[in-house]
Image: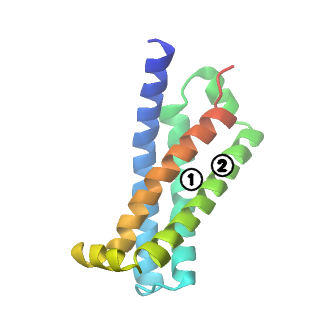
Amino acid sequence: MDNKKALIAEFLRYAVVGGIAFVIDFGVFALFREFVFGGGNGVAAITVSTAAGFIAGLAVNYVLSMLMVFRTKKQQEQGRNLKAVLVFAVIGVIGLGLTELLQWLGEAKLLTSTMGKELDSAIGGLGVYAVKIVVAGIVLIWNYVGRKIFVFKEK
């Protein structure tokens, strides 16, 4: 398989891993949002729920990335040292920052606009979760590129 096809296959595997991690992230986010914060929309509900989901998803993402995505011997060696785990986590923390910012912007700015309120109403009040899905897609790309370049790079 040439390099371009290998890279596409690797990204597709990462997208599957990201999808699995997202299900965990989304589940923890919803659990916190609905049960811990009783469906609240305050800053604490947004921030804590988003962070809890992201951290759970990050842990799943690391394990599955090592098992399914970055599979070459060199990548495995690169991903298993303390420095790599820390860089993986830093990329995740940057992703968390992006997630927090974009989730807040989506909820505080988009969903409170006239168009956002209409959209939220049209989807049965699930706008918060629609924002979460869009944000996750954006951050998925950051996470893959950051980890590919800074943790699992091929020299």
- Say which amino acid is labelled 1: Ala
Give me the C-alpha separation between circle 2 and circle 1. 13 Å
Q: Residues within 10 Å of mark 1 (few under 14, many from 20)?
A: some
- Of all residues, the one furthest to the right in this rendering is 83
In the image, what residue occupies the spot 33% across and 75% down? 115
Report which residue position mark 1 lands on: 59
Q: Is residue 137 left or right of residue 119?
A: right
Query: Could you say which is closer to the camera, residue 140 or residue 110?
Result: 110
For residue 137, above or below residue 28: above
Q: Is residue 98 left or right of residue 20?
A: right
Q: Is residue 125 left or right of residue 151?
A: left
Q: Is residue 75 left or right of residue 1?
A: right
Q: Earlier in the sequence, mark 2 or mark 1?
A: 1
In the image, what residue occupies the spot 55% across and 30% down? 70
In the image, what residue occupies the spot 42% across and 74% down? 31
Task: Report whether residue 79 is seen.
Answer: no
- Say which amino acid is labelled 2: Ile
Element under disc 2: helix
Q: Position of residue 127 (x, y in %)?
A: 34, 72
Task: Report whether residue 68 is seen.
Answer: yes
Q: Position of residue 10 (x, y in %)?
A: 47, 29
Report which residue position mark 2 lands on: 91
